[in-house]
Amino acid sequence: MRASTNLRNLLAGQGIIVAPAAYDCLSAMIIEDLGFPAVFVSGFCLAASRMGMPDLGLEGRTLTVDQSRNIASSVNIPVIVDAGTGYGDAIGVYLTVRELIRAGVAGCFIEDQTTPPVCPLIGPPKVISTEEFLPKISAALEARREEHDDDFVLIARTDAARTLGLEEAISRGKAYRNAGADAIVLPGAPKEKARLKAVADALAVPLWVVPSFEQGLSVKDYEEAGVKILAGIEGLFAAAKAVTDVYRELKETGTISEKHYQTPTAMPEISRILKVAKWTDLGTRYSGK
């Protein structure tokens, strides 16, 4: 089954899709190993891990497609990609979607920010008009048809809520849905369960939100509120803290406590996730030894 078909089946099925963000192949493989149904390649994680830069939309199409291809080839679950604004105008979106399909990606979202975009975690985003964004959806749909992958999941993201208000964001979401988007990402969606459910009901299309676990909501709460896709970048933050803690101890004390890395258990676990036995077996069989 194609990854895109898998993702579309998940979208049409019961229950919420929790798709944690991966920042590299190993983190994606851990996500798969833990039993999550899909993995998210975020622009924030990509910029940080591949460029050492904040998420200012500077990673570009080539880097995004390259890392997405690597991650998609390392897991057997669908990969959903943050494609930013599509890296240009409608023609840029067409090319981006075409290249992501060829890279084995199951779906992507494009956003209605100006180019280059700004991550809402960094600063207030600016958006283009609905009339300017709709041709991008049309171009993405054309690329999907021409690549003969009608199951590729096209998601539209609107960042209008933070600057133009929630009602404008809902209005845009409906317009993007009517233009052919399979789902809507809505940064700035309400963090209260009841208000979030009202938004999901108004959009009448699968809704993707970034979790606010610090607000006390759980996956179950989001599911009950009508959210279909839940994807955040908590893993990158946790990984950065873990690396900081272990190497701070090395810098300050000249050693590292085994509690940080637990080699006797960590190495076998990583070896299993990386499928060392599979690659060793292949090497043995094909070497004739």
Image (tube, grey):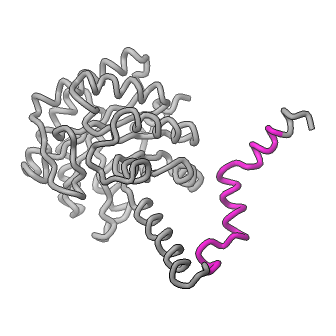
What percent of the width, then of the height, locates residue 18? 42, 52
What percent of the width, then of the height, locates residue 28? 52, 49
The relative height of residue 108 versus residue 225 in the rendered view (above or below) is above
User: Does residue 256 appear anywhere in the picture?
Assistant: yes
State the quadrant of the C terminus: top right
For this orientation, the residue located farthest to the bottom is 253
Residue depicted at 42% across the width and 30% down the height: 100
Residue depicted at 60% across the width and 78% down the height: 256
* Count of numbered marks: 0
- In the picture, residue 218 is in which quadrant? bottom left
State the quadrant of the N terminus: top right
Looking at the magenta stretch, what is its main secondary structure?
helix
Image-based side of 167 in relation to 210, left or right:
left
Image-based side of 58 in relation to 151, left or right:
left
What percent of the width, then of the height, locates residue 240? 44, 65
Residue depicted at 50% across the width and 47% down the height: 37
- In the picture, residue 286 is in which quadrant? top right
Front one among 163 and 9: 163
For this orientation, the residue located farthest to the right is 289
What percent of the width, then of the height, locates residue 167? 8, 47
Q: Which residues are magenta?
A: 257-283
Magenta segment includes 232: no
The relative height of residue 245 versus residue 148 in the rendered view (above or below) is below
The relative height of residue 11 versus residue 239 in the rendered view (above or below) is above
Residue depicted at 79% across the width and 45% down the height: 280
User: Does residue 231 appear anywhere in the picture?
Assistant: no
The relative height of residue 239 versus residue 281 in the rendered view (above or below) is below
